[in-house]
Amino acid sequence: MSNKRIDPVTGTETTGHQWDGIEELNNPLPRWWLWTFYATILFGVIYVILFPAWPMLTSATGGVLGWSTRGDVAAEIQAVDDAQAPMRNRLVETDLAALGDHPEVQGFARDAGAAVFRTNCSQCHGAGAAGGIGYPNLLDDAWLWGGDIDTIATTIRHGIRNEDDPDARWSQMPAFGEILSEEEIATLTAHVMSLPDGTDPLAGPGGELFDMNCTSCHGMDGKGDQSLGAPNLTDAIWLYGGSEEQIAHSISRGPFGVMPAWGKFLSEAELKAVAAYVHGLGGGTEADPATN
């Protein structure tokens, strides 16, 4: 049964709704509001025709204009790439060791290399390149494979102990836990820990073990061999931790860190740029004239 009636005061029909004695008048919506509402409907119809709108199973409707935010971003990236192309070409053509003679190219390389580093290297070496347990600190001058700019570029290009690049840097420390007794491991650990304090690497019982098992890679003086990636044991810089437990673990298990061959993923300009950036962080060395 309808509760609609004509309101005696305004002469307007009510909707039949009533709350606590208050009745709702059935006034028409303002024309401006209706036209605005109709305009939004029309806008919505036009939008879904022109632009991506409806989600599908694997994608969305593309719209007749073919526009997308991805396309805008790709166009902006392409514009930047085009603007940087001449400088990238100069970087590719410039010998890394001669970058210092071309300040403009060197500045570009280090700026571009910082971006490459943040994208590809910071996950292991840290945002500040200080490294961590198992990941070398790139800020100091302790380089396992050499720290001049060309050597750094070679390490980045081919990687370390990976199976993807036949020219990857390669060395392997034996797991001496399978060779030496626990007592010998403890003696050798204490001896290695004392080397940064100036202990003769070949002195005492620990020295005998060191001579028999470690000198072939780390040298008679314990200072390592960059051609083998064997670290200097006298500088108190420990890649896998310097506590007694950590050093004993390294001796027993034989660490085996792997670095990708970035030459398979980076362009030549990107590779040279990140080499220049890493070399310029503060720990890079000059090339040894004897090796040139």
Image: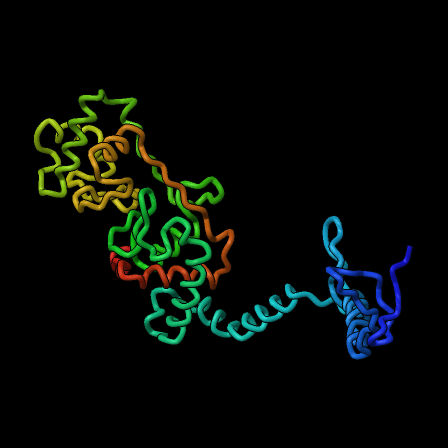
Spot occupied by residue 256 in the image (x, y as percentages of width and height)? 36, 37
Taking depth in this image into account, of 40 and 290 the one nearest to the observer is 40
Q: Quadrant of residue 128?
A: bottom left
- The single residue placed furthest to the right in the displayed view is 1
Q: How many marks?
A: 0
Quadrant position of the N terminus in the picture:
bottom right
Q: Choose between 173 and 247: the one closer to the eye.
A: 247
Q: Is 55 positioned to the left or the right of 168 in the image?
A: right
**Residue 64 seen anywhere in this rendered image of the structure:** no
Q: Residue at x 22, y 29 (%)?
A: 213
Q: Position of residue 100 (x, y in %)?
A: 32, 71
Residue 88 visible, this angle: yes
Q: Is residue 215 above or below residue 167?
A: above
In this rendering, the answer to whether 217 lies above or below 263 is: above
The color scheme shown is: rainbow
Q: What residue is at 53 percent from the left and 72 percent from the top? A: 85
Residue 261 position, x and y percent, is: 45, 48
Locate residue 212 relative to residue 92 in the image: left or right: left
Q: In this image, 14 relative to 174: left or right?
A: right
Residue located 49% across and 43% down the image? 164
Q: Is residue 3 above or below residue 182?
A: below
Within the image, what quadrant is residue 258 found in? top left
Image coords of residue 152 (percent x, y): 35, 55
Dividing the picture into quadrants, the one containing residue 65 is bottom right
Q: Judge by depth and name the residue closer to the eye, 231 or 96.
A: 231
For the C terminus, give its image quadrant: bottom left
Q: Nearer the viewer, residue 285 or 55?
A: 55
